[in-house]
Amino acid sequence: MEERQVAIRVKDVKKVYKLYDKPSDRLKEALGLCGKQKKHKEHYALNGVDLTVYQGESVGIIGTNGSGKSTILKIITGVVNPTAGEVEVNGRISALLELGAGFNMEYNGIENIYLNGTMIGFSKQEIDEKLQDILDFADIGDYVYQPCKTYSSGMFVRLAFAVAINIEPEILIVDEALSVGDVFFQAKCYHKFEEFKEQGKTIVFVSHDLSSISKYCDRVILLNQGNKLGEGEPKEMIDAYKRVLVGQYEVPETEESNPAEEEQTQEAVEDTAANQGVNPNLLEYGNKKAEITEIYMCDEKGLRTTAVMKGSKFTIHMKVRFEVDLPSPIFAFTIKNIKGVEITGTNSMVEKAFLESVKAGEEMDISFTQKMDLQSGEYLVSFGLTGYEGDEFTVYHRLYDALNITVISDKDTVGYFDMNSKVEIVKVSK
């Protein structure tokens, strides 16, 4: 069996940042005015991370904010030096990290194409040969002859992406860059991504879009708080990531760890998990005769999460407390897309699930279980607690755009939801 060639190898890499309470502490320490006293705290952005990417692989890196995903990409590309450890890269890299970071806003688009190409290491002749492909991909028309400072944000990222993607690298490093521009440009970006995979290029892909991770990656690496928690098949690691989101994992032991810090870290994760996906700026109103006290979602295994696989069952929960006696309260939820379009929803009265009166002081946990047939993407859930007092409709408590749901899928059809069509094709001979 032929041995696989290594494209990227990261061995025991650590990245430590010094954090100061105030700028003067940094100056005092730099001038040696503090003696042996440290004026800083050490923050491990990466703590002894190992990973290997083989030539022709598409590897995804996932994790919560602050897990070290972008840091490790910057170390691989040479933008940032590691505090300790070794990095080996075999092949020419194109990095889509901070699109347009090398652009001069006073230059026009053409001038910036040549500026960036030169920085990457191409000759004028090589850039001349690639120029038309870059212009065709960016598709910003005559604006390419105008100063970049006059561009809309959409035009700017289109040109920056077009420059980065058309240098024909051996290794492509992508950090959330495939979500730029409008839906048509995104489709073009993903098509280019597919081309790279078919050509056997090596791809390292960081994204919060778990559907893209599931669809395009052969293997996934899970990071959290600077530690590597695991690696494996996309579905396995996405499931592990969902457990990380709700604090149901163990913090790995490291050389620099101590039990007190680990306990504090775990408590912080659990505190975050308790409010995971809840909008801190949600809109609420009502007379509060009854109150929604907690909202959350669970996957088909009963684990709290904000991400659900399309085609699987999931449950939306709302806990409520009643301050007064009430006749037949109605519990409801609706789901909107991020543009504010109401897509679906239901309530306990429509479902004929609860038509009873309640007493003051009672608490209830209401659950709505259903199959997820929405297309991949981000959605917002609103909650309602209402009822009729006589003939008068009364709002006790409503929470608008309260909970975020991420739907993960490797197959999307047209529109908002999947009709789960069964396709049968029969060849009829003449």
Image (cartoon, rainbow, N blue to C red):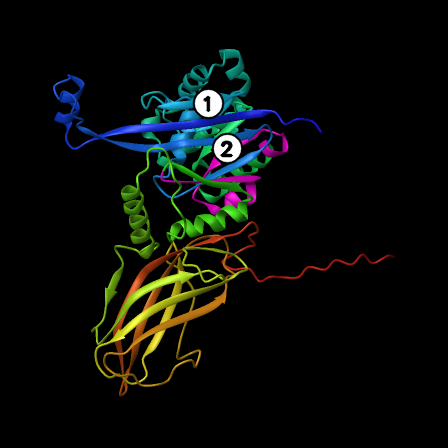
Mark carried by residue 163: none
The boundaries of the magenta stretch are: 196-225
Residue closer to the observer: 293 or 102: 293
In the displayed structure image, the side of residue 10 where residue 153 appears, left or right: left
Mark carried by residue 87: 1
Figure check: 63 above or below 134: below
Q: CA distance from mark 1 to mark 2?
A: 15 Å
Q: Residue 69 location in percent, x, y?
A: 41, 35
Q: Which residue is located at x 37 percent, y 25 percent?
A: 146
Could you classify mark 1 by the number of other residues whose Cα lies within 10 Å: few (under 14), some (14-19), or many (20 or more)?
many
Residue 15 visible in the current orientation: yes
Specify the amino acid type for callout 2: Val
Could you classify mark 2 by the number of other residues whose Cα lies within 10 Å: few (under 14), some (14-19), or many (20 or more)?
many
Q: Residue 255 location in percent, x, y?
A: 36, 33
Check disc 2 and report the residue beneath it.
204
On whether residue 219 falls in the magenta region, the answer is: yes
- What is the quadrant of the N terminus in the image? top right
Residue 156 visible in the current orientation: no
Disc 2 is placed on an element classified as strand
In the displayed structure image, the side of residue 179 where residue 281 appears, left or right: left
Q: Residue 238 location in percent, x, y?
A: 49, 48
On whether residue 33 falls in the magenta region, the answer is: no
Residue 33 found in image quarter: top left
Specify the amino acid type for callout 1: Val
Q: Residue furthest bottom?
A: 390
